[in-house]
Amino acid sequence: MKRPRVVPLLLSLASLGAGLAVLAVFFSVLGYDPVLALGAMVRGAFGSWYAFASGTLVRAIPLMLIALGFTVGLRAGVLNIGGEGQFYAGAVAAAWIGLKLGAWPGFAATTAVLAVAVVAGACWVAVPAWLRLRFGVLEVISTLLLNFVAEALVSYMVQGPLQESQHIYPQSDQLPLAARMPVFPGTRLHLGILLALSCSMIAWYVFRRTMTGFELRAVGRGPRAARVTGGLRVQRLGAMALLVSGALAGLAGGTEVSGVSYALYPNLSPGYGFTAIAVALLARQSPMGIVLSAILFGALEAGAGAMQRDAGVPAVAVYVAEAVTIIAVLLADALSSRRRDMVTA
Amino acid sequence: MMLDAGVVDGFLSASVRVATPLLLAALGEMLAERGGVINLGVEGAMLCGALAAALGAASGGAWTGLAASGVAGLALATIFALAAIGARADQIISGTATTLLAVGLTGAVYQAVFGSAGAGLSLPTLVPVPIPGLADVPVIGPSFFNQPVTTYLALVAVPLCWWFLFRTRTGLALRAVGESPEHARAAGVAARWLQFAATVTGGAFAGLAGGTLVLAQVGTFAERMTAGRGFIAIAIVVLGRWHPVGVLGAALLFGAATALQFVFQAMGLAVPYQLFLMLPYVLTLLLLAGLVGGVKAPAALGRAAE
């Protein structure tokens, strides 16, 4: 039975509303003025074209890419919780290669930086993919564990091989101009946005129009049924999906270094890898939905910074809104699927 | 290079000290997983336990803090259980969301109560209590029997969990639910109630683990201070093959891997400290690949019971 497409959209919006409502209540309990706090948040995210482009959209880029990756995995029945680690793997590789390419022409250098980031992200997740294929190690655990390894790796890099030339600060040197992505005039919005949108479109096409998309859907709908017909194919598809997933997260790390920070820092990601899971869930596996939902969560992240700055409210509190949104989506889906089961039974 | 007795003692006590919260959290997670529920919210429950311990200890002393930490962990696990067991939502994602919730809650509450700079708290802590007689045994005496009370709590919980899982009817029923909720239910077991109880109890364990971290190790609270220990606990459960004694061994192994850095420092070896940050995680991956191949998880792990 085909459900009208408006219903999931309304459910998603209601879930986000629930998240914000709980956040407002939480603020009141802590003694902050929720109107003031949420007002500062909205202004910070949507207050001007500059705020929207340089705050919201810039943060939406990595969220979009990592969420697309998470969704590719989800469609194949694998859960990649390691987006954060793969993002950092991509960032390390991008900074490392970017620092060496000052003499290259701009386009070539940027392309090389991003390509290396993609490969690094895929390599980082290749370990969990292989462990899953060969030893049946749960990818949930292995991808998660590698997040911590990646964070330690970044910490080592910025105090070791990639430390800036003065050897004072825990960060790398600034990338040469050639390795930086161009930004839209008057904003900090970089070309990564076009990249992220293209990836969404490609994902939409692959999911909808290709054999791989069909197989993914079959596996995602019912792994057991698909295994009966496909045997090893399911396992292989899962491993492939993990690699693509890691590649996209690595690309996010690359665009962040090449388009935003221009250097490697230890806290480059404010938890993009986990926020992206919320983005993907809110979008209910739809690539076009991910575009919208990434912008919404980008607004949440950008607004949180403004909230801390302008209203003195802890920015970390937005995680409450994100978490409640995820739980609300899960509950709505669980309840509606149970109702469907009852109808068909 | 010679290792003197002081270094060995220091290494062993550090291992046990680091292992204590991991052991508590892992035992709790083991109970839930034996019932077929994988709870990634254990990291969040630890974090809530840590903050509750700090708040409780600041107002009513270390014991109040410890009690508060257990209650806080239980409360957070209840949220997870309502979603994952009550509404049969995906366990992995519910758990991730619960941890995210805890990061936001604890961070904001901490900043609201103690100020955004997070002024250094000095809290009443749990001091080591030597056990008469045993504490003087060479080598293992000071490391195992001259520890804060939470370490003894964790060590006593190991045989208790074993007895519960393998010698009581409820434990048997819980394991049956973890293998096949449908069959357990057909045999008259209240499958989802048992899962709920095991998960929530596990949350209390995780909360106590967070409390241990604050009251017996660090002496203060910091945002995200659990730093992935809850996730390590999940790996320890797998590594310990879902058995209390195995979990004890795996937790000690992790403690030892972390404590190695003190030895290396004492020996004056110039090894980047980040290597030690990575070591436990890499070790787990290696062990999972090597050891877990032939071990069976509870068959219904991660699948919602009907």
Image (tube, rainbow, N blue to C red):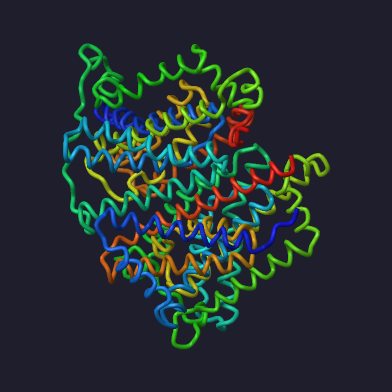
Residue drawn where x is 27% and y is 68% of the image: A311
- Against A4, residue B121 (above or below) is above
> Residue A194 vs residue B61: left or right?
right
| Location of the N terminus of chain B (image quadrant) | top left
* Residue A140, horizontal then vertical, whole percent: 56, 44
Q: Quadrant of residue B28?
A: top left
Q: Is A41 in front, or is B160?
A: A41
Residue drawn where x is 30% and y is 68% of the image: A36
- Against A140, residue B212 (above or below) is above
Total tally of numbered discs in the picture: 0
Residue A26 seen in this snapshot: yes
* Residue B93, horizontal then vertical, whole percent: 53, 47
* Residue A240, horizontal then vertical, whole percent: 69, 53
* Residue B172, horizontal then vertical, whole percent: 55, 16
- Against A185, residue B25 (above or below) is above
In the displayed image of the protein, which residue is found farthest to the bottom? A185
Residue drawn where x is 52% and y is 29% of the image: B195
> Residue A215 vs residue A5: left or right?
right
| Location of the C terminus of chain B (image quadrant) | top right
Residue drawn where x is 56% and y is 35% of the image: B288
Residue B1 seen in this snapshot: no
Q: Is B111 in front, or is A158?
A: B111
In the displayed image of the protein, which residue is found farthest to the right? A229
> Residue A130 vs residue B235: left or right?
right
